[in-house]
Image: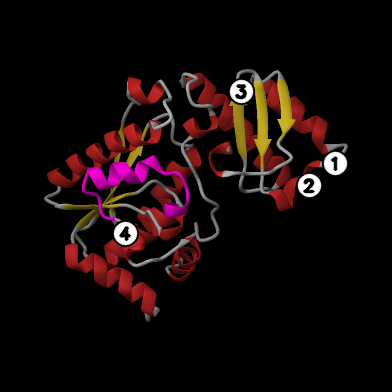
């Protein structure tokens, strides 16, 4: 199969440090890196951390892509640390530091020296404490190193034949809870059920349900807000979210913003 210039660049970069261990979250970016890592070396591995902050759809996508890419896939069961569950402003730094540590352990067991992730150029434009953790842990970011942003990464995913090529950006479920409010498995489960219900009822792929105690604040892309203004749909969504445990349901009229800011 003939690859584009940028696909060849990515594979060539990974070959220089192969074999690698890919921190495979199930998001678009890390899936692309996992496929390229397998092309770069048969001995590369993918490692996915499975704890209750991870959306089940992301875990399923990680399994699917690893299987399609033919890369050895290690799933590590874990539990969020007390620091992460306390939900400080830099929660993502502590979470990523812990998870990268687990990936490095698996890499060491496999005789692999280099850990890579899916950070890309567009990530530098947002508040991403996790990128600071990657740097501190010595994790490489090939997409970022090549200057590839989300658009190019999506194009590569399509070129590689990955089913996640049109998947919207994802984030751990903890990001739906305001900083300072303690994270619990029950809260995250309620949020995940609510988001899945909205996707099923509306067809909208990018959905965030921000939890403010018993209140659910729904965020969707601004250009899809009008889909909610349906007299039959609104009561159905409200009823379903109340069934998941929320007592009040609201729609954020400003639409989706990273981190709900």
- Observer-nearest of 136 and 190: 136
Residue 74 visible at all? no
What's the distance in space between the residues labelled 1 and 3, CA to CA? 25 Å
Q: Residues within 10 Å of mark 2 (few under 14, many from 20)?
A: few
What's the distance in space between the residues labelled 4 and 3, CA to CA? 42 Å
Secondary structure beneath dot 4 equals: loop
Secondary structure beneath dot 3 equals: strand
Secondary structure beneath dot 1 equals: loop
Write down the quadrant of residue 148 in the picture.
bottom left
Q: Earlier in the sequence, mark 4 or mark 1?
A: 4
Q: Label 4 belongs to which residue?
A: 70
Q: Label 3 belongs to which residue?
A: 212
Residue 129 among magenta residues:
yes
**Could you tell me if the residues under marks 4 and 2 are in contact, i.e. CB atoms within 8 Å?**
no
Residue 252, given in percent of the width and then of the height, sits at 71, 37
Q: Earlier in the sequence, mark 4 or mark 3?
A: 4
For the record, the magenta segment spans: 123-140
Q: Residue at x 15, y 48 (%)?
A: 110
Q: How is the image coloured?
A: secondary structure
Q: Label 2 belongs to which residue?
A: 227
Q: Earlier in the sequence, mark 3 or mark 2?
A: 3
Q: Residues within 10 Å of mark 3 (few under 14, many from 20)?
A: some
Q: Look at discs 1 and 3 and give the one toward the viewer.
A: 3
What's the distance in space between the residues labelled 3 and 2, CA to CA? 23 Å
Q: Residue at x 68, y 38 (%)?
A: 198
Instruction: Check the picture and name the quadrant holding the N terminus.
Output: bottom left
Q: Residue at x 60, y 31 (%)?
A: 210
Q: Label 1 belongs to which residue?
A: 230
């Amino acid at each position: 199969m003939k690859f584009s210039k940028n696909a060849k660049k990515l594979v060539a970069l990974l070959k220089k440090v192969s074999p690698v261990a890919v921190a495979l979250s199930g998001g678009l970016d890390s899936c692309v890196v996992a496929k390229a890592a397998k092309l770069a070396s048969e001995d590369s591995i993918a490692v996915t951390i499975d704890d209750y902050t991870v959306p089940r759809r992301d875990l399923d996508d990680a399994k699917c892509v690893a299987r399609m890419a033919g890369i050895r896939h290690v799933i590590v069961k874990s539990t969020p640390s007390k620091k992460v569950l306390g939900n400080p402003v830099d929660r993502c730094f502590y979470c990523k530091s812990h998870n990268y540590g687990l990936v490095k352990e698996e890499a060491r067991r496999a005789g692999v020296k280099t850990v890579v992730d899916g950070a890309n150029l567009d990530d530098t434009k947002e508040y991403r404490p996790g990128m600071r953790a990657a740097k501190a842990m010595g994790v490489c970011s090939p997409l970022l190193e090549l200057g590839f942003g989300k658009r190019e990464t999506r194009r590569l995913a399509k070129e590689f034949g990955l089913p996640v090529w049109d998947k919207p950006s994802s984030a751990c479920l903890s990001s739906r809870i305001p900083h300072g409010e303690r994270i619990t498995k029950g809260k995250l489960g309620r949020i995940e059920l609510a988001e899945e219900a909205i996707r099923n009822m509306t067809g909208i792929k990018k959905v965030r349900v921000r939890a403010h105690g018993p209140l659910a604040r729904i965020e969707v892309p601004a250009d899809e807000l009008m889909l909610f203004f349906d007299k039959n749909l609104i009561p159905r969504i409200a009823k379903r979210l109340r069934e998941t445990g929320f007592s009040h349901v609201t729609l954020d009229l400003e639409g989706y913003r990273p981190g709900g800011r």
